[in-house]
Amino acid sequence: MRTVSRLAGIPPTIFATMSALAVRTGSVNLGQGFPDVDGPAEVIARAGAALSEGHNQYAPGAGLPVLREAIARHQQRHYGLSPDPDTEVAVTTGCTEAIAAALLGLVEPGDEIVVLEPYYDSYVAMIQMAGGVRRPVTLHAPDFRLDPAALRAAITPGTRFLLLNTPHNPTGTVLTRAELEDVARLAIEHDLIVITDEVYEHLTFGVPHVPLATLPGMWERTLTLSSLGKSYSLTGWKIGWATGPADLVGALVSAKQWLTYTSGAPLQPAAAYALDEAGGFPAELAADLAARRDLLCEGLAALGLAVNHPEGSYFAITDIGSLGWADGHEFALALPERAGVVAIPTQGFYDSDAGRHLVRWTFCKQPAVLEEALARLGKADLRKH
Ligand code: GLN
């Protein structure tokens, strides 16, 4: 059989597969990370108004100035960074497009990209489509911290990029300033460009999020990516952005023009309004999520599952070995029938075998939904036989 796809060997995204399985089996969906309550009503009303007020034609390629300026103010307010909204900020169709455009715009075939494992599945697909070579560095269970020696060992003379993610999906690890200083030292020593996915930047639980770009010597080599979806419970809007030095942002915009050309115009003034006028929402959401993390993690632990203590994101990870299972995929496929619940096996987010026994659960659902899932799990026989 001939191989015709640049995606050869890469399975379809597991999130869509597992959401479809949840619908088909009537399961509680703790798989794909999307909230079941929409973000601020006044932000949504702004989007409606933008539609009827005539923001319905192409936006500029890098995004409407009103949103680029609001993103620059957001970076200033939270992190003391002052990107130029004209050259150092670009709007994308969600962070997933930002990742795609960054890799397609910057990577030369054969470039090595060091990436934390487990990784968000789109990283693998996009590195492969860009012709890059991934070099994973494993965050090991149970606490999933970054080992600087492993990071150093993954860097070779062919390495040009680090692709970072903090707060980290799927482990909930939030890299500390000290860990990021190790990353920065290595990036400077080896003259690497860092692409950093920080979509959960506001969703941390009692620990600070430190953008790598704020560390000395890092602004000029870091392309920081984020989005509105996670911070404002508006994942379907697909509004993302990149900030960084003009040459990196410019390379991303050059690739983006051949992907989506421009991003949805009516949502951009509303996204600007969210950042400027509803800035309190993400912190309230984070406080809410911290309580829901506790509800889910305590419930899973009570069922006999070893569970981590995520410091950020939407997700918790369990080790299903305690229930006699060795293969997360097998467990996740049995779960709808056994319990009427869907979760995500993590082994597809690894090159190594380090995640074979791990399963991801989202807690970004209403407490009653989490309780229902736990009640179903409590009634089910979850042991391997
Ligand atoms: N980021 C979300 C998750 O990890 C959704 C990803 C997706 O569906 N592409 O669940």
Image (spheres, rainbow, N blue to C red):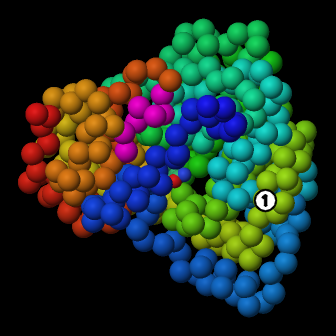
Please count the marks in the image.
1
Is residue 374 in sight in this rendering?
no
Q: Position of residue 157 (x, y in %)?
A: 76, 9
Task: Identify the residue shown where x is 41% and y is 32%.
Answer: 347
Q: Is residue 126 magenta?
A: no
Q: Secondary structure at mark 1?
A: loop
Is residue 27 in sight in this rendering?
yes
Q: Is residue 348 magenta?
A: yes
Q: Position of residue 258 (x, y in %)?
A: 85, 53
State which quadrant residue 368 falls in: bottom left
Magenta segment = 344-350
322 left or right, relative to 242: left
Which residue type does callout 1 highlight?
A: Thr
Q: Quadrant of the N terminus?
A: top right
Task: Identify the residue shown where x is 44% and y is 63%.
Answer: 35
State which quadrant residue 86 falls in: bottom right
Label 1 CA crowd tier, 10 Å (few <14, some 14–19, many 20+): some
Task: Identify the residue shown where x is 33% and y is 48%.
Answer: 343
Q: Identify the residue at the far bottom of this view.
A: 52
Task: Identify the residue shown where x is 27% and y is 65%.
Answer: 26
Q: Quadrant of the C terminus?
A: top left
Q: Position of residue 57 (x, y in %)?
A: 85, 78
Q: Give the residue at mark 1.
A: 260
186 left or right, relative to 25: right
Q: Is residue 191 above or below residue 209?
A: above
331 left or right, relative to 148: left
